[in-house]
Image: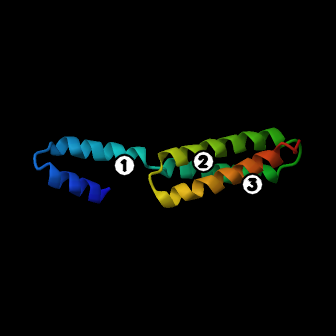
């Protein structure tokens, strides 16, 4: 991103610095997946806790897995990092496997 900004500034010596700073802030906010990662970790903790419960836990687990799926989709759509994007597909696959397994639990 820094290189692209530098190239833009070289090609456009006259620019509105305030507008550029606002645009950079918006882009940084759009690509920030910290909140989604925090929620995903929370959902994983919840999943583990629910697995330790006795009784009917299938519906609770199903709900938590749905939330995991939602977070993994959001991470994939927000991230501009190729390394992260290559991990999103396996993450979604694991969440889908969890979903299939959870459907067999009462």
Q: Report which residue position mark 3 lands on.
A: 48
Name which residue lies at 21% across and 40% down. Answer: 19
Q: Nearer the viewer, mark 3 or mark 2?
A: 2
Q: Which x, y percent locates residue 50? A: 78, 49
Q: Which of 82 and 73 is in front in this view?
A: 82
Q: Is residue 40 left or right of residue 63?
A: left
Give the structural element (helix, strand or loop) at label 1: helix
Name which residue lies at 25% across and 53% down. Answer: 5
> CA–CA distance between discs 3 and 2?
18 Å
Q: In the rendered view of the protein, which quadrant contains the C terminus? A: top right
Name which residue lies at 34% across and 42% down. Answer: 26
> CA–CA distance between discs 3 and 1?
32 Å
Q: How crowded is mark 3: few (under 14 residues within 10 Å), some or many (20 or more)?
A: few
Measured along the vertical axis of the image, is residue 91 above or below residue 68?
Answer: below
Q: In this view, does 70 lie to the left or right of 16?
A: right
Numbered circle sitting on residue 72: 2
Q: Report which residue position mark 1 lands on.
A: 28
Q: Nearer the viewer, mark 3 or mark 1?
A: 1
**Labels 2 and 1 touching (C-beta < 8 A):** no
Give the structural element (helix, strand or loop) at label 3: helix
């Amino acid at each position: 991103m820094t290189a692209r900004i530098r190239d833009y500034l070289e090609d456009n010596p006259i620019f509105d610095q305030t507008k550029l700073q606002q645009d950079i802030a918006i882009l940084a906010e759009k690509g920030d997946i910290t909140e989604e990662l925090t929620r995903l970790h929370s959902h994983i903790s919840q999943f583990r806790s629910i697995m330790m419960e006795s009784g009917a836990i299938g519906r609770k687990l199903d709900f938590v897995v749905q939330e995991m799926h939602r977070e993994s989709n959001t991470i994939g759509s927000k991230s501009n990092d190729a390394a992260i994007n290559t991990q999103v597909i396996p993450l979604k696959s694991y969440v889908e496997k969890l979903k299939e397994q959870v459907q067999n639990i009462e």
